[in-house]
Image: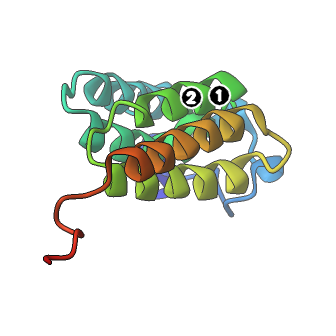
Amino acid sequence: MKDLTKKHSGGKIIIEDELEQNIDYTLIPDKVQEICMNWFLKSACIREVLPRVYLELCLVSCHKFMQRRVQQSDLMRLSKMVRGIAEPICASYTAAYLARVGYSISPDAKDYLMVLTEFSFLIAEKAIREGNSKCESEE
């Protein structure tokens, strides 16, 4: 995105580092904002849950190019999407990755973590109650 911003701003370096407090959002060209919004709209068209969640987690730091910060509602929406992953191990790993990305973006946000924690307990409870046929010992 740095190269794209430099290309569409007439060669001026607008983004010198990744720290948000040093970015002047008014200098980001409209073309860069349009391309960034296009990627978010493309990711919204993905029907499968797992690739969509991972792509949105990768793109979540690009919200700054659209002159907006990552909101608590974005993290909450992603945490609810994680509940739609059918495979328990994939869902747990994705929840851990979401917690890591969410903490790097907003260390003070906790609501989405409560949803992830509740979901993790439900997965563990289901595994204890139903067991796993692959793990049962043969007698």
Q: Is residue 50 visible?
A: yes
Colour mode?
rainbow
Q: CA distance from mark 2 to mark 1?
A: 4 Å
Contact between labelled residues 1 and 2, with CB atoms less than 8 Å apart: yes
Q: Residue at x 68, y 41 (%)?
A: 113
Give the percent coordinates (x, y) of residue 117: 64, 43
Nearest the camera: 133 or 55?
A: 133
Task: From the viewer's perspective, tell me whether residue 134 is left or right of residue 91.
Answer: left
Q: Residues within 10 Å of mark 1 (few under 14, many from 20)?
A: few
Numbered disc 2: secondary structure: helix
Q: Residues within 10 Å of mark 2 (few under 14, many from 20)?
A: some
Which circle marks residue 49 in the picture?
Answer: none
Numbered disc 1: secondary structure: loop
Residue that badge 1 annotates: 67
Give the percent coordinates (x, y) of residue 82: 43, 37
Q: Residue at x 18, y 59 (%)?
A: 133
Instruction: Please state which amino acid type lies under the numbered disc 2.
Output: Met
Q: Is residue 122 above or below residue 97?
A: above
Instruction: Please state which amino acid type lies under the numbered disc 1.
Output: Gln
Nearest the camera: 89 or 78?
A: 89
Q: Residue at x 57, y 35 (%)?
A: 63
Q: Is residue 58 visible?
A: no
Callout count: 2
Residue that badge 2 annotates: 66
Q: Residue at x 50, y 27 (%)?
A: 80
